[in-house]
Image (cartoon, coloured by chain):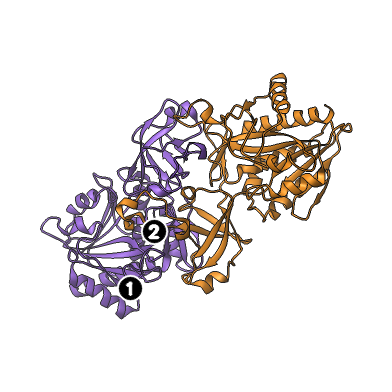
Amino acid sequence: MLELVKELCSLPGISGREDKVREYIISKIDGFCEYSTDNLGNLIAFKKGKMPAKNKVLIDSHMDEVGFIVTGITSEGLLKFANVGGIDTGVFLGRNVTVGEKGIPGVVGLVPVHLVDKDKEDCIPPKDELYIDIGAKDRDEALEHVSPGDEVCFESDFREFGSGFICSKAIDNRAGCAIMIDLIRSELDYDCCFSFSVQEEIGTRGAQASAFSINPDYAIITETTTAADLSGVEGEERVCVCGEGPAVSFMDRATVYNKDLYRRALEIAREKGIKAQTKTRVAGGNDAGAIHKSRGGVKVLTLSVPTRYLHSPGCVCRYDDIESTRDLVKEMAAEFAVC
Amino acid sequence: MKYTEVRELLEALCGKGGVSGNEDDAAAFACGLLSKYMPASTDALGSVTGRKGEGSGIILDAHIDRIGMIVTAVKDDGFIKVAKVGGTDSRVITGAKVTIHGKEDLFGIVTSTPPHLAKKDSDAKAPSFDEIFIDTGLGKKAKDIVSPGDRITLNGSFLSLLGSRIASPCVDDRAGVAAILRCLQLLEGKSTCPIEVIFSAQEETGGSGAEAGVYNFASGTAIAVDVTFASAPGVSSEKYGSLGDGALVGIAPSLDYNMSKELLALAHKHGISAKPEVMGGRTGTNCDEIQTLRGGIKTALISIPIRNMHTCVEVCELADIEAAAELMAQYILERSGENA
């Protein structure tokens, strides 16, 4: 599955431009399930299990990643841009990016620190002062290569490091996509539906539509969530810890989770010897926010890969946490199918 | 592809480490390149020096060190504390990918504060170097590889932008080193005055390398090649040069005015792109150290304009490096003619 994660993370796919990610996923699941793409671009799959399921279970992961969109081009040939999804400015100043379908390389420029007033040296410049430099001499040269509306992604630079860690852009949420592909390619005990959803990062828009179409009884959202297991951060403030398995949510800013499902996930993890932990803060939000109130309501469970430095060019997680998350998602899907 | 020679030199040089005071691998590599043209070695402070010909001629200087960080402590949990070396820009540090030059080269990433722990104005203020850690993903085992004093370079790729523009870490001042090596290449097979070359250590921490290294030279004339600001939003094109301007010839009270004028005249005569860059006092380059060495050295400055100085994405135009190389070569040929 590591190869899947690596290839998925390397693909460009900001919200609304998930095409390349979807094409890749189709190439991996073709022949293992029935699938279709809906009007928004959600890739919806149905996998037959060894047995029919009593309840309809949906597993959801979003395909999109945070990034930028070109809003205009200056007379000097520099690109102005808007954020797509929530990104702190501090993590992309002076970083490499790729622009448009052709992946034109560019860099995020800023006024050199030497020329900044002394009292502003540690100030992050306001977003409207920033630009992407693709090396164009003027607007005309830039326009030969890019247009307003072009997508901008962090440069893909996947690597394994440390003791079992990986670092890349877009681990949020290609880790979830890799898990779903892996499940679809494996043998499942019960029938199961899958939604590779679009536009999570701009407000869980894809999942709202796919949950309506699928009309599930239960949904398992496979995600990444903040691991703040950093130096000097103690106890529940860490949210979750790398290496301790999937974080199980009881509540976040978009969803109050079904308490039985939350408890059951921790119990089953213990029974099956799969590492798992409680997500110890009410923070963040994901597709569960849209799915749990779909139609007449859906019981939801979120299992997340603990990930440091989310929404940055260098998200960090442990590969074995992706494996544990897959294992628990698989167990819970089987559990919900017949409960 | 244009400017192949300069591109190859710069790409190879930018791929080396060499944070101030620990220029080893970059210096060794540059020393190898310089040895093609003259006997070269590394001096007491780590600068690369070489000499071709006997007696007084001309000194060419560019600095080989680069900005970065230094390990100050490895915590028990394996997270690494750092200080900056040179004017590393704290605004681009959050989430930066780095290489720690410990017992072996180690990948690391600068930690960023998760949203729930961030202060209200965290999107407005960059963390100080005291507040950040480096995460190696090794936990306690980091102590086996990393020790206080190890240097840290900021990762980045040598990115080909449109035309002949590139972005890379440490274009400051590998562009200057590349310009001097290219100049020597252009002069190959030509008879010249004595040439003394220094790729100086520790410019970013105050110029000690040039001050100590040039002391051992015999010439009374010097040209330093460094980078300067290129116009961009917030960087005035009236005050600073622009990418593509060619060689920017410094004019400043601390520089030799006649040399500046001669360089500009030679550029005009030979159709080399060049423009004056005027400063009101000292230059903030090795020229400041070189000028007053021994009984004084006539010093000129050629600058290559770059954007985003002291970040991992210093953008330059290869044509400007080529112009700097050509201009130095013409100046040396002119001097050599006079001497002959």
Q: Which residue shows up at 44% across the image and 55% down it?
A: A126
Q: Nearer the viewer, residue B136 or B2?
A: B136
Q: Say whether residue A1 is visible.
A: no
Position of B151 relative to B229 (above/below): above
Q: Nearer the viewer, residue B18 or B40?
A: B18
Choose top left, top right, bottom left or bottom right for residue A54: top right
Q: Which subunit holds the residue at mark 2?
A: A
Q: What is the three-letter code of the residue carrying label 1?
A: Ala
Q: Which residue shows up at 35% across the image and 45% down it?
A: B19
Q: Which residue is mark 1?
A: B274
Marks 1 and 2: CB-CB under 8 Å?
no
Q: Which residue is mark 2?
A: A111
Q: Is residue A320 left or right of residue A216?
A: left
Q: Position of residue B104 (x, y in %)?
A: 44, 36
State the hue of chain B. purple
Same chain for mark 1 and mark 2? The answer is no
Q: What is the three-letter code of the residue carrying label 2?
A: Val
Frontmost of labels 1 and 2 is 2
- Tell which chain the image draws in orange: A
Look at the numbered disc 1 and give the secondary structure of its residue: strand
Q: Residues within 10 Å of mark 1 (few under 14, many from 20)?
A: many
